[in-house]
């Protein structure tokens, strides 16, 4: 064999190997994002009980079990706690890998202040049967379907608000761009865009940013959406619904800087509340009294 042919074969083999590694790493990242190890319902409940964030007995909420059929046919498992002579309804959406039980720490004070509570397992989590979460892309549409159900049941004049953290916060912001018919929204430690969040994660893992292209290509085929489809901050900016942005200043999972982006893109209708010393999704846990006061002041001003 001619030496130059051998060199070409070796170079070709190396290139094929590198391309294979590139797509294998991209696939692994998409797989990790879309099929995470999720926590069991009972564990997520016990977690907040053990922290002292909720009492062991919360039977006073009288949770009515419901199933909402989303527009694409997926069944969303839900609980509804009707408060007598309520001031309105707050829909709470949980975070990535968590379940609706993680919303109870917020539900307890919202219920105390006169609101009915709607909890649900986001698709791909808890008891809602779907293969994978979509990081807010379809979950935001699910929230719109839940709001439509509540309007059909309680009438067009009922006050409805949204509250959640992390991926749930992204879902809330996405729902605003989809036209959710609500009076207020609270997003706690949500990401400004999925693409920017993944960039941040890649840098933390010392992986090159050009993996984004491979991830997008695989996502479109495997889970039918891509990174650019999940832009919560931009979706929220389409709406003029009053938005409260909450973020812990020590959050290194969804960086605090992302909430600054959300605020800058939505400041005409948004307020921001930051919590010193709070890590990801721990703003309430860090300062529950101030958190409750801030959230209720925002709600009372906007209903």
Image (tube, rainbow, N blue to C red):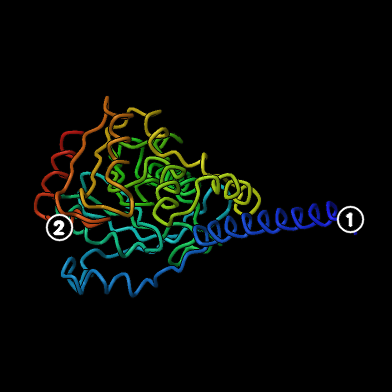
In the rendered structure, the answer to whether residue 37 lies left or right of residue 225 reads left
Which residue: 31% across, 65% down?
101
Q: Which residue is mark 2?
A: 286
Which residue: 49% across, 61% down?
124
Determine which of the numbered discs, if any, sits on residue 2 in the image.
1
> On the image, which quarter does residue 127 sit in?
bottom left
Q: Residues within 10 Å of mark 1 (few under 14, many from 20)?
A: few
In the rendering, at what x and y percent does residue 277 appear? 15, 54
Measure the C-alpha gap from mark 1 to mark 2. 70 Å
Judging depth in this view, the residue of 214 and 92 nearest the camera is: 214
In the rendering, at what x and y percent does residue 91 appear? 32, 49
Provide the secondary structure element on which disc 2 rests.
Answer: helix
Above or below residue 266? Residue 143 is: below
| Circle nearer the viewer, 1 or 2 | 1
Judging depth in this view, the residue of 1 and 156 nearest the camera is: 1
In the rendered structure, the answer to whether residue 219 lies left or right of residue 270 reads right
* Residue farthest to the right, as pictured: 1
Q: The C terminus appears in which quarter of the rendering?
A: top left
Q: Earlier in the sequence, mark 1 or mark 2?
A: 1
Judging depth in this view, the residue of 102 and 227 nearest the camera is: 227
> On the image, which quarter does residue 176 sit in?
top left
In the rendered structure, the answer to whether residue 276 lies left or right of residue 13 reads left
Determine which of the numbered discs, if any, sits on residue 189 in the image.
none
Above or below residue 229? Residue 292 is: below
Which residue: 21% across, 72% down?
49
């Amino acid at each position: 064999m001619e030496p130059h042919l051998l060199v070409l074969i070796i170079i070709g083999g190396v290139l094929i190997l590198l391309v294979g590694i590139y797509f294998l790493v991209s696939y692994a990242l998409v797989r990790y994002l879309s099929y995470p190890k999720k926590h069991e319902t009972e564990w997520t409940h016990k977690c907040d009980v053990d922290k002292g964030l909720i009492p062991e007995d919360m039977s006073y909420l009288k949770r009515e079990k419901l199933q909402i059929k989303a527009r694409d046919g997926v069944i969303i498992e839900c609980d509804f706690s009707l408060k007598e002579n309520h001031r309105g309804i707050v829909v709470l959406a949980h975070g990535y890998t968590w379940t609706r039980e993680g919303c109870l720490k917020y539900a307890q004070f919202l219920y105390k202040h006169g609101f009915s509570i709607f909890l649900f397992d986001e698709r791909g989590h808890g008891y809602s049967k779907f293969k994978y979460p979509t990081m807010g892309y379809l979950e935001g549409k699910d929230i719109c379907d839940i709001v439509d159900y509540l309007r059909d049941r309680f009438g067009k004049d009922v006050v409805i608000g949204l509250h959640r953290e992390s991926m749930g916060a992204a879902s809330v912001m996405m729902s605003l761009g989809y036209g959710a018919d609500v009076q207020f929204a609270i997003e706690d430690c949500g990401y400004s865009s999925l693409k920017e969040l993944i960039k941040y994660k890649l840098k933390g893992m010392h992986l090159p940013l050009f993996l984004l292209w491979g991830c997008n290509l695989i996502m479109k085929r495997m889970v039918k959406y891509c990174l650019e489809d999940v832009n919560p901050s931009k979706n929220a900016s389409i709406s003029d619904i009053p938005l409260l942005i909450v973020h812990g200043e020590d959050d290194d999972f969804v960086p605090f800087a992302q909430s600054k982006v959300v605020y800058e893109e939505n400041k005409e209708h948004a307020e921001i509340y930051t919590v010193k010393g709070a890590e990801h999704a721990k703003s309430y846990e860090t300062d529950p009294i101030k958190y409750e006061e801030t959230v209720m002041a925002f709600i009372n001003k906007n209903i």
